[in-house]
Image (tube, helix red, strand yellow):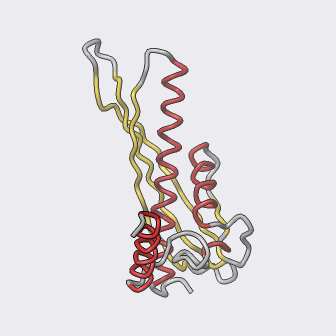
Amino acid sequence: MSVRRFSTLLIAGLSLGLASCGFTPMYGNGSAARGLENVQVETGEERVDFMLQEALLDAMGSRRAGDGRTLRTETELRATQLGIGADAIARRFAIRLSVDYQLVDDRSGDVLFSGSVTAETSYNASSAAYASQTAQLDAEERAAQDAADRITMQLARAARNGELW
């Protein structure tokens, strides 16, 4: 049997195995996050709020939202010194992003689902100011992406369990 034919059979077998175990993709057509693409997203006005909103819109596929449900978030961003060097200057920092969220029915004002997530990242400070600022902004963006993924997973799980609609 040729390597090409063997790999084709292996891929087909794995595909059948995933289909029979109830596997549902988190994103894409027919995904577990179905229904989230119509949810509007409202966040605060800080930079991290904008990054969270963009990550949520991408994760939920809700760029064309407007069916009467809104996801409202409230964020808290904290930076903590982790490591102090021999020169008594902090060189490592942790970023902690806490997000409380509510999925609200716009017509009735009822809260359909609520929760909170926390995302943590870290970065190393450099002696160059621009490099340190860039590292901090990158860490904040990674924390916002992680928080958006966690929120999307919680909402997708709730939708799949029939808790949302």
Q: Nearer the viewer, residue 15 or 92?
A: 15
Q: Name the image quarter holding residue 107.
A: bottom right
Q: Of all residues shown, which one is farthest toward the left?
A: 86
| Vertical placement of residue 67 versus 2, above or below | below
Taking the spot 34% from the left edge, 31% from the top edge, the residue there is 81
Q: Position of residue 114 (x, y in %)?
A: 48, 72
Taking the spot 68% from the left edge, 74% from the top edge, the residue there is 38
Q: Nearer the viewer, residue 116 or 57?
A: 57
| Vertical placement of residue 59 versus 66, above or below | above
From the viewer's perspective, is 62 left or right of 143?
right
From the viewer's perspective, is 70 left or right of 164?
right
Taking the spot 47% from the left edge, 39% from the top edge, the residue there is 139
Taking the spot 74% from the left edge, 68% from the top edge, the residue there is 64
Q: In what quadrant of the picture does the N terminus appear? A: bottom left
Q: Position of residue 135 (x, y in %)?
A: 49, 30
Q: Of all residues shown, which one is farthest toward the top?
A: 87
Q: Position of residue 88 (x, y in %)?
A: 29, 16
Q: Of all residues shown, which one is farthest toward the front?
A: 1
Q: In what quadrant of the picture does the C terminus appear? A: bottom right
Q: Position of residue 4 (x, y in %)?
A: 46, 64
